[in-house]
Image (cartoon, helix red, strand yellow):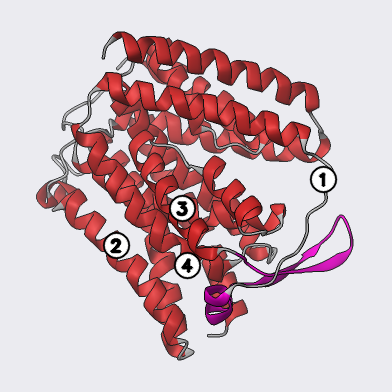
Amino acid sequence: MTPQFILAALFIALTSGFLGALLGLGGGVVMVPLLVFLLDIPIHIAAGASIVAVVATSSVSASVYVRDEITNMRLGMFLEMATTLGAITGASIMVGVSESILETVFALSLLYAAVIMWYQLRSTGRSWIPKENDWLANKLNLGSSYYDSARDENIDYGVSRSLPTFLVSYIAGIISGLLGIGGGGIKVPAMNVVSSVPMKAAVATSNFMIGVTAAASALVYIRNGFCDGFITAPVVLGTLAGSFIGAKVAIKLRGVVLKKVFIVILLVLGIRMLASGVAGL
Amino acid sequence: MNVRQLELFVSNVLRFGVMASGILIMFGLGLYMVTGDISCPTGDSSLQWILYGDPFFAPSHILFLGFLTLVATPLLRVAASTLAYVVEKDWAYAAITGFVLTVLLIGIVLGLG
């Protein structure tokens, strides 16, 4: 492991963390393919580095959200039952799966992320309709409220269709453990679209869950030797620094053009990875 | 401990956990850059190695302790929540967080067993 190699990994992580925070997408989804293509790191090792970095960034952002009382901690803990189980399932599958299969699944998730981002770009400004708690949410008191500083009002909301969201969270956990990414791109739409949780609360709650979810799978990665210290270390530090800067800049910036560019990047990485994965099947 | 106190505690646990691990990782990586010492293999996670290293201040062992601190942070958060719900006699949420804690402990058994 040369110093140049470590610096290159640091730089890739810095860029991915920055873009991730800027665009509200976890850094892992861009970082893993960049590590694989630019530094020729096996995808299992890249995912192992990424999952540890995901614990770091989500812990930092969760600490801020929790302080601001936007996170729905009850909903988070309820769904964590599903995501942690999924994470262990996914990480255990990862251990026995070939590089080509992992690359193919990763490619599909990149293309999925591009579609989600495109959809979000088109649906901005669409009004959100509050719903009542369903029976389970009622029993567990899942509905909550938060203070929206932009609109200067308290937003009350219920959680509808909590069981379907619970099941989707299990799948999100599997994907997260399998690919070493946060999986916010699955959880946020599930909470927002299926369960009618307002976007801000959904993002905050997803971040809150990701730390625990990633920690569950990180242990399995570490044990199985997919967590190379000299790759993981620069990746963690780079992602932390990048997402810190990204979060500062994101407040001042509204990037529609940036999002369009990013969609293209996701598509290119996705197609490239699909080609590489399918070729080896 | 009431819920708001719990939230603030959780927020602090997360921040300090990341800071502590960041310092360990920077130290380990810096040490490696200076010494070029790769004396203990990465990927070894036997209990023996976690506790003592080979030697203790080998860069890769310090890095590993940094990763472990990081991964333990959310775990500590869940344990704190479980305790708070038990104290509040909120049994439904004590059970929910207890379940999550159990899954994480299974992860440790699968991970470090």
Q: Amino acid at mark 3?
A: Ser
| Residue drawn at 41 percent across, 26 percent down | A106
Q: Which residues are magenta?
A: A135-160
Chain to which mark 4 belongs: A
Total of numbered circles in the picture? 4
Q: Amino acid at mark 2?
A: Val
Instruction: Specify the label residue A80 is tagged with.
Output: none
Answer whether labels 4 and 1 touch (C-beta < 8 Å).
no
Disc 2: which residue: B103
Q: Please tell me which of labels 3 and 1 falls first in the chain.
A: 1
Marks 4 and 3 sit apart, C-alpha to C-alpha, by 10 Å
Mark nearer the viewer, 4 or 2: 4
> B73 above or below A156?
above
Q: Amino acid at mark 1?
A: Arg
Badge 1 element: loop
Answer whether labels 4 and 3 touch (C-beta < 8 Å).
no
Badge 4 element: helix
Instruction: Specify the label residue A78 is tagged with.
Output: 4
Any magenta on residue B105? no
Disc 3: which residue: A169
Q: Amino acid at mark 4?
A: Phe
Mark nearer the viewer, 3 or 2: 3
What crowding class fits label 1: few (fewer than 14 Cα within 10 Å), some (14-19), or many (20 or more)? Answer: few
| Residue drawn at 35 percent across, 74 percent down | B98
Marks 3 and 1 sit apart, C-alpha to C-alpha, by 24 Å
Disc 1: which residue: A126
